[in-house]
Image (cartoon, helix red, strand yellow):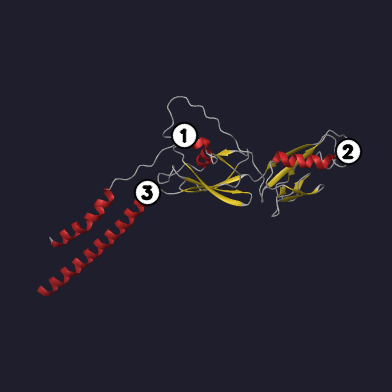
Amino acid sequence: MRFTRLLLLLAIPFYFVSCKSQQKLPNYLVNMSTSTTTVVTKIPELRIQKGDLLSIQIYSLATDPKVDQYWNLPMQYTGVGQTIGQGTTTGGFIVDGSGNIEHFRLGTIHAEGVTKQQLAAEIKKRLTQPVELLANPTVTIRFLNYQVTVMGEVAKTGTLIVPGENITILQAIGLSGDITQFGRKDSVKIVRTIDGKIETGFIDLSSKELFNSPYYHLLQNDMVMVDPGKIKAKSLEQAVVAQKVTFALTIATVAASIANIIINSSRN
């Protein structure tokens, strides 16, 4: 009888902890109106960063093979990291630690901090001034390594490659399998590098104001971090309590068994 009472007393703390009400996590866009809502979002103009890998293709209206053979060639990938035509052996033009690219014919060009359009304008200028290397050149620039990383309480963490050079935080979360039942939707952290400086921002996925956030559209190399909410902390706390109670009950059972053996032995 005493042993049974002891087990009940040990189990009572765990019972109250496990039965304590849990905070419900907010859902996406919980305060969005049910009526039709039109929101205009501005897609940010991407600026080139150190470490970016750029595809740069140059064309012109010239038809002289002696002039055009090094320019009017599409970038072709061999599948083993080699590039034929205007690229390099890395499959593109890498922005180095000084913020420059090394073009095989135009030399060193500063790229960090400018947009693709601005870099294209600088390349066009070098192609036409002071000596016209090409007639009416056209320059097309694309990011080859546009990517964002999603970490924390999502179904699948990792780095997402974005071929279209545009992705929203909702799309990134969706491609990562959604936020788990333990993740916070009201305070998602974004770590972003701008001009070599790291900034941290937060976005509330449960608010309709997320469309106006500068972090709604992700930039290249952004890191999205979803922190666990109080529910997970409470679950971990309950698991620890359960382990302690189980351990205590095991000790009590063993002790009771030993006591019974000793009592029975003394009687005999």
Residue 92 in percent (x, y) is at 72, 47
Do residues under tags 2 and 3 come within 8 Å of each other at their CB atoms?
no
Can residue 58 be seen here? The reply is yes
Please rate how many residues cluster around mark 3, counting C-alpha atoms within 10 Å: few if below 14, some from 14 to 19, many from 20: some
The answer to whether residue 153 is left or right of residue 78 is left
**Residue that mark 3 sits on:** 230
Front-lying residue, 193 or 164: 193
Residue at far left of view: 267
Residue 74 can be seen in this image: no
Circle 1 SS class: helix
Q: Which residue is mark 2?
A: 65
Q: Classify 10 Å Cα crowding around label 1: few (below 14), some (14-19), many (20 and above).
A: some
The residue lying at 49 percent from left, 37 percent from top is 210
- Point out residue 52 in the picture as x, y percentages from the top left corner: 67, 48
Q: Amino acid at mark 1?
A: Lys
Given this view, does label 1 or label 2 mark the residue nearer the observer?
1
The residue under label 1 is 208
Q: Position of residue 192 (x, y in %)?
A: 57, 48
In front: mark 2 or mark 3? Answer: 3
Point out residue 260 in the picture as x, y percentages from the top left corner. Answer: 15, 68
Q: Determine whether, in the image, residue 77 is placed left or right of residue 261.
A: right
Image quarter hosting the C terminus: bottom left
User: Is 32 drawn above or below residue 251 in the view shown?
Assistant: above
Q: Nearer the viewer, residue 83 or 41?
A: 41
Choose between 247 and 146: the one closer to the eye: 146
- Sort mark 2 into few (<14), some (14-19) or many (20+) by Cα contacts within 10 Å: few
What is the three-letter code of the residue carrying label 2?
Answer: Pro
Numbered disc 2: secondary structure: helix
Mark 2 or mark 3, earlier in chain: 2
